[in-house]
Amino acid sequence: MKNKFVFAGLVAMGAAGLQTTFAESLDLISPKNWNVSATLRGFYDDNYNIAGNKKGSVGAEFSPSISLNVPLRQTDIGLRYTYGLYYYQDRQDLNLNAFDQTHQVDVWLDHAFNERWKLNVTDTVAIGQEPDLIGPTSISTPSGVLYRVQGDNLANHGTVKLDTEWTRLFSTSLQYGNNFYDYQNSGATLGGPASGLVWLRQTGVPGGVSGFQFLGLGGPSLAGLLNRVEQNVSLDLQWNIQPETMVFVGYNLGLVNYTGNEPVGVYNYLTSPAPGTPGSLVYHSADRDSLSHYGYVGVQHDFTANVRGTVKGGVTYTDSYNDPLNKSTTLTPYADLSVSYTYIPGSYVQLGFTHDINATDNASVDQRTGSLTQNQESSVLYASINHRITQDLIATVIGRCQYSTYNGGAANNEADTTYGLGVNLHYQISRHFSADAGYNYDNLVSDVAGRGYERNRVYLGLGANY
């Protein structure tokens, strides 16, 4: 995690992986305790607001970074700060603020108590607008929000991991993770007219119902929908059955608590939940809190010295315990598969697939049943190729496809399919200077009206490292 986002902000989830590779290569040629780097790029983004009605803009990006690494006898401590400044010509032409700013701080600590006990602590805090910056830190992890969000939105991702080798064959891995999200967009209000009232009248209900003042929601805020704390505690029991093969069985407890404390949906009813009494049930952020239990087994195997694969599979039991009207439990499959192949030094291929439950910014209410959208069930297929064309020229291609279905609400069982592609060429001009060029493509195809979009970005830049 310490190498994430040397270039913050504008690049898609795939490109974030490219930047990780570049950061590592820069560290290799500058093996100091401290490092200072900066990039200057020009770009064109044909949908910088990530919306159905495209708005394109040329622009420029300036992103300096400073990092510090302190290797001690049994401890490695690191700190990295990355700043991003982005200029959009189109916004200046519209007399809007033409600049965006992002900040990211990465902290890591590796400590070996002895040969058998090892501790790893990482934390990343980011403030920005792009979903790739404030969303999950892994390309294989589903995202709760798929579009750019105005404002100083904050996300923090922290993990603490303790690996213990009890015997030559048996070991354990205990981990705690905490994700915190805070969006600046807040302030949802209740009022009329109620969106569900039209449907109620069409069912032919008796006159007089129109005299009841149903509630409407002007639109939930992102703070109400997505401000949350995600916590998980996992324990893996691991057996090294052969030098190249490890099998494991594990359990993960996941907690999601929404902290926006705002209305996110309204159910206008005539005969339920109180028969014969019309009324409005207001859903709030915390009504989407959940508790999840993961059980899984897996195997990690080194097929050869340069081919490694991991298969993890099981089930997830999720309890949406805080829904005031439709408390529900779901049992879904859980999977995490990956394989990597290093075919020549500096060149490798990675393939992977994940299936899991994730948060969503859609909290629609089914006016027929009162059901609220709780989450999504997502499958992610991803692949990357990093190829060293020459000693100084590296080409990287990363692709990603995510298929997600909604659980509950008016969008129940409807699907979002997202496609992402990132292509980058990185050329090391000299020890301290480099150049890169790239293209990123994103496409969201959704069953939900007005949600889809398409986006293309190209960029060309110079980098300096000392």
Image (tube, rainbow, N blue to C red):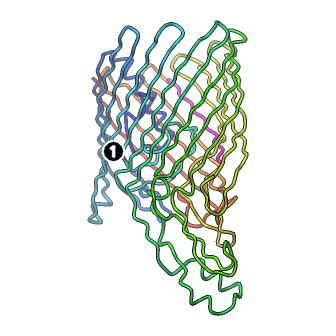
- Residue at image position (57%, 55%) is 288
* Residue 42 point in image, percent of width and height: 33, 45
**Residue to which mark 1 is pinned:** 102
- Residue at image position (58%, 38%) is 140
| Count of picture labels | 1
Q: Is residue 200 above or below residue 133?
A: below
* Residue 256 point in image, percent of width and height: 55, 46
**Label 1, residues with CA under 10 Å away: few <14, some 14-19, many ≥20:** many
Q: Is residue 181 left or right of residue 376?
A: left
Front-lying residue, 385 or 203: 203
* Residue 310 point in image, percent of width and height: 67, 25
Q: Element at badge 1?
A: strand
Which image quadrant is residue 75 in? top left
Which image quadrant is residue 85 in? top left
Q: In this view, does 210 lie above or below 355?
A: below
Front-lying residue, 248 or 277: 277
Q: Is residue 90 left or right of residue 141?
A: left
Give the extent of the magenta segment.
377-388
Q: What residue type is labelled 1?
A: Thr
Residue 379 lies in the magenta-colored region:
yes
Q: Is residue 299 above or below residue 259?
A: above
The N terminus is located in which quarter?
Answer: top left
Assign the magenta stretch its main secondary structure.
Answer: strand
The C terminus is located in which quarter?
Answer: top left
Residue 365 lies in the magenta-colored region:
no
